[in-house]
Amino acid sequence: MYEIPGFTDEHHIPSAIAVLTSGGDSPGMNPAIRGVVRAALHRGIKVFGINKGYSGLIIGDLEEMNSASVTNIVQRGGTILKSDRCEAFKDPAVRHQAAEVLKEKGIDTLVVIGGDGSLTGAHYLTLENDIRVIGLPGTIDNDIYGTDDTIGFDTAVNTALEAIDKIRDTALSHESLFLVEVMGRNSGFIATHVGIACGAEMIVIPEYEVKVDAISSQLASNREQGKGSSGIIVVAEGPKPGLTYDLAKQLKNHGQQPKVCILGHIQRGGIPSGHDRILASCLGASAVDYLCAGYNDIMIGVRRGKIVDTPLAQVIEKSKELDEALFQRALLLHK
């Protein structure tokens, strides 16, 4: 499925590798863990799993893993290593403490699976300490710079679609309008993909200003033309809580009678899709390849069907932009 780089220089074999999952969980983290563990063991490298992300690393909650540790986990959602959001890791002294924990265990490399905040922690950990790091993009939001796809995005889209297909039955039966909120505080990747796939009447995302008058006029026009007697508007949650309820209230003031359905954390859970299992497995195994070839301070992702690396400094400094052409195509299909 993915074109994987071949490395001829493998003179940087780590003494031991640690792996952790951090931040919000995403379906596919377990296959990624399995990829790291199995690829490392194949080279005779010890592997340690860190429980509860950076929080577990700080207190030394590590355990050595073997092949059996990752048996029958590819189909499981969440992460067997657990996860956490560790505010303390923003402190350089805490990062130094974490590095010392690794060194005391004879571990000189770390694989971090997570989103923007987790990869930022990995970047500063290696800048300040003699620990090599590789990051893997594990987030359902698909908003990480340097990769076309992130671990968990495909599953989250499919989970939202399954829910919306059920909601549509009620929308059709009552000829009613539903505002369905999906995740996406700062990006509309999930909302745009879900909106296209479910045939939503409209999509509301953070990248574009919400114009209630225009939405209401379009809905009225659709109904006059007999193509909007019932339907779905997909709304990204946005940076502030309550956006969807505020939008519903404003639409009511314009004569609409929308119902609100918040999908919430249901999008994080569930069995990872086949796509996410393959993506995560390939990225996990490739992390070991890159470490053995001497790479450090990078994130491994995919672009145009190829596994690629991007410096973590760029990953955390640059923003991944939503494909405007895709969003415009979505608008066209919904007219």
Image (cartoon, rainbow, N blue to C red):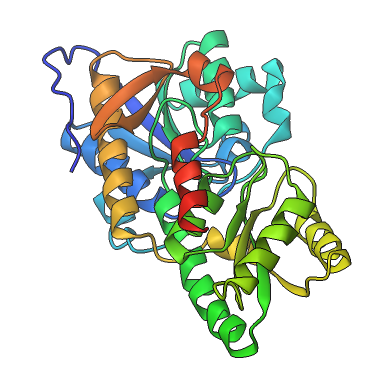
Say whether residue 291 is left or right of residue 105: left
Residue at 42 percent of width and 49 percent of height:
29
Residue 291 appears left or right of 233: left
Q: In the rendering, at what x and y percent does residue 333 appear?
A: 45, 56
Q: Position of residue 129 (x, y in %)?
A: 53, 11
Q: Residue at x 34, y 51 (%)?
A: 276
> Is the residue 199 above or below the residue 193 in the image?
below
At a point 27% along the width and 22% down the height, the residue shown is 290
Between residue 156 and residue 126, name the one nearer to us: 156
Query: Against 281, is 286 above or below?
Result: above
Horizontal side of residue 246 vs 274, given as left or right: right
Q: Residue furthest front?
A: 225
**Residue 88, picture quadrant:** top right
Q: Nearer the viewer, residue 66 or 214?
A: 214
Residue 113: image location, x then y, percent? 46, 38
**Residue 181 location (% of width, % of height):** 66, 61
Quarter of the image for residue 261 reads: bottom right
Q: Which residue occupies 28% across, 43% down? A: 35
Any part of residue 323 in sight: no
Of residue 221 and residue 229, the one placed in the foreground of this image is: 221
Which residue in the rendered view is the most extreme toward the right? 253
